[in-house]
Image (cartoon, rainbow, N blue to C red):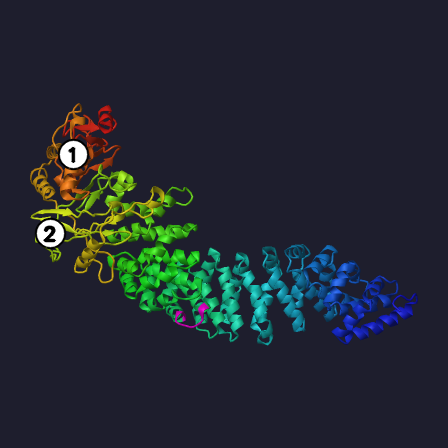
Amino acid sequence: MLNSPEEEILAKACEAIYRFALKGEENKATLLELGAVEPLTKLLTHEDKTVRRNATMIFGILASNNDVKKLLRELDVMNSIIAQLAPEEEVVIHEFASLCLANMSAEYTSKVQIFENGGLEPLIRLLASPDPDVKKNSIECIYNLVQDFQCRTTLQELNVVPPILDLLKSEYPIIQLLALKTLGVITNDKGARAMLRDNQGVDHLIKILETKELNDLHIEALSVIANCLEDMDTLILIQQTGGLKKLLSFAENSTIPDIQKNAAKAITKAAYDPEIRKLFHEQEVEKCLVALLGSENDGTKIAASQAISAMCENSGSKEFFNNQGIPQLILLLKGDNEEVREAASLALANLTTCNTANANAVAEADGVDPLINILSSTRDGAVANAATVLANLAMQEPLRVNIQNHDVVRALIGPLRSANTVVQSKAALTVAATACDVEARTELRNSGGLEPLVELLRSKNEEVRRHASWAVMVCANDELMAVELCKLGALDILEEVNLSVSRKNKFSEMAYNKLLNNNLSLKYSVTGYLSSSNIISDGFYDYGRDLCLQEPSDQRAVLLVNSKSSDVSPPPSTEDKSSDVGYGRSISSSSSLRRASKEKSNYHFSTGFGSPTEEKSEPPSGRNTAVSKGTTKEKGSRKVRGKKEEEKVKEEEEASTLPKLMGEGSPEKEWYPPFDPDFCVYVYEVTKSIFPITNIKEQIEVLAKYVAEKMGGKISKEKLHDFSWELHISELKFQLKSNVVPIGQIKKGIFYHRALLFKALADKIGIGCSLVRGEYCRAWNEVKLMNETPKGLIGVLPPPEVYIVDLMFHPGGLMKLRSREADLYRYL
């Protein structure tokens, strides 16, 4: 019948189909299966108004079916439906055509078709229709359309705000609600907010909030006002008309959780603008937020905490929350809701950043314990926030001690191992802030915290690398920790990082230098240089650049500087060794105790002494030395000299009775370096005879002659090749049965022997000098001396000159660093 040429039959058929479709979704599907849709689309443009009206009514009903929608999009009938919105058409046609469009506009493809076929303008015009159904359908369709940015932009050009504001006066709540929802979307754009302000829209919204009978509209009205608060001009208008205080009072006193939550969210959103924050502070928005923290609704607590976080950028707000707010936030940390704890910890993190008063307030409110508990939370955000707060607190020494007493170091191990880069970064930063004393660093090491910390140095995240480097730098202040970090490969990783322009940072460079400066034996081996500020102390050894690459050889002895004997007497052996003392040294990769014998005042190392390149020492002076494991990656592995199995057993038995420096269960054993009585005498003599000299240049010259005298005297350049120092060193190694030779026992020394002795003695009496390693057993000392002030330039200090000290050819001679004479000395 839909294909009948008679208009009356068409009208009646459409009417019957309309009634059938009204009965439910099943009937709509039946009509689709029977093929009713396609012939009906042709009737939308029929000449007879009644036929056209009835066909439109059918589509208004059918369009709620998804399959019908899909077919209508394929048939491209959108232009025909929009045509029914023409002013000359009946209200009934307007009603059902707009209903069809409202149903169709729920899907993106249909939105595009409506927009491209010019559907926006007639829909906006119909907002002023006298029929409430037309208004409802039109505003619903517009609400669906404005979810698309392009449609929102076009709506502003069509001046859509005034007709939407008129809908707020409607007596039908659904129309008011849809109007508010639409305003809530379009006022995300600045232009729409200006239009709302110019058309007194804010007044309409405030009135809705003040009307209790309209409480079902309060949430949506608040959402629109939240967008308006982001606009400074609109906010000032609200404030000048008293609307802001009304808004805050409304939020604080409302009994509807969603209203309180949305009010806090509105404040959060707007408070990111500094001028708006200032205005909020003047209106005492903080009081409202503190009140919202006490809500029973978790969503409100979260929103209020987030708003406090945003307001913390204002210094006045920070001060306010010092007295009110921090105790309430601490209380939220103790709750069970993880999201609430995360939001509260974020607020505390912002409150305590660069604010000592707030940090103290957190500690006074017993916030340390719950913060440390959060470090084991399953939410990464909460862990990162808690770590930040603890780092902020640890900036003050009394609070740092308080935190350390709560076992914070052990609690940080988990976050250090996290897969989240933000957590890693904040945890490393907290380690840097809390590991500022020996006890905390020791606990970190004993808890297994150094391994994950070193691994973070490899991170691809810049902030993680920076904070990890900072923490390593702090930990490296302890020599024992520096040795342990080197064992774990920190030095090698930092060296690799610092070679990359994009990966290195100031902290990675400082951490690298700190590790070396607290392990001078390693620094000299790696860099071949010790500055005047690097003071050689007892336990220092020089195993040369060559031994960094290979096992100890007969051509290169390990030089040891030690003027102190151990105060600890090892137990006597059961064998006939009344003159022997067992002493040991731990190997960095596999700890084992080494024996030594003592013959009157002479100590020497056992034959099986391991390669210093894989060893670490811990002399009584506190100096610990080790070589980074990482260097083996680039330079090849180095083996430790083997020893007989039975000898190992004996030594382990002896080791079990020796005092342990690191306590029970630690693999670290105390090493007793051989006492060097000759060097001890040298120190005594130079202290007595050279130290009193007041002229620094004279001190250097006398010390240089003294060193040369003890190392075989002056040697002419022509007879340098006849100076049989190698045989002398070999005899000492054979006599000591060790590759390690105390520096004082060397009586025939070449350049590097003399330079080391000069540096060691100069450091004992306060003469500033550097030690520089050259090629082929060469080394020299550099000193800085002030030049005389030129005549006529009173009070002007010339820059110091750097000199090389001659210890071989003309002991005591000083050669300017860049002179030909100095270059020749270094070459020879």
Q: Is residue 491 magenta?
A: no
Instruction: Please state the horizontal and vertical placement of residue 219, each as a whole percent of the image.
Output: 57, 70
Residue name at image x 34 percent, y 42 percent: 635
Residue in the foreground of this view, choosing between 162 and 531: 531
| Up-down relation of residue 281 to residue 716 (above or below) | below
**SS for callout 2:** strand
| Numbered disc total | 2
| Up-down relation of residue 721 to residue 593 (above or below) | above
Residue in the foreground of this view, choosing between 526 and 67: 526
Residue 156's tag is none
Magenta part of the chain? 332-338
Q: Quadrant of the C terminus?
A: top left
Residue in the foreground of this view, choosing between 745 and 199: 745
Mark 2 nearby-residue class (10 Å; few <14, some 14–19, many ≥20): many
Amino acid type at mark 1:
Leu
Q: Residue 431 appears in which quarter of the rendering?
A: bottom left
Residue in the foreground of this view, choosing between 228 and 753: 753
For residue 86, say whether it is visible.
Answer: no
Residue name at image x 10 percent, y 53 percent: 577
Q: Residue 522 appears in which quarter of the rendering?
A: top left
Left or right of residue 674: residue 394: right
Amino acid type at mark 2:
Asp
Instruction: Please state the horizontal and vertical placement of residue 791, each as a whole percent of the image.
Output: 18, 25
Q: Quadrant of the N terminus?
A: bottom right
Q: Residue 374 appears in which quarter of the rendering?
A: bottom left
Residue 727's tag is 1
Instruction: Please state the horizontal and vertical placement of residue 532, each as a whole percent of the image.
Output: 21, 39
For residue 192, say whether it is visible.
Answer: yes
- Mark 2–mark 1 Cα distance, whole angstroms, equals 27 Å
Mark 1 nearby-residue class (10 Å; few <14, some 14–19, many ≥20): few
Instruction: Looking at the image, tell me whether mark 2 or mark 1 is earlier in sequence order.
Output: 2
Residue 580's tag is 2
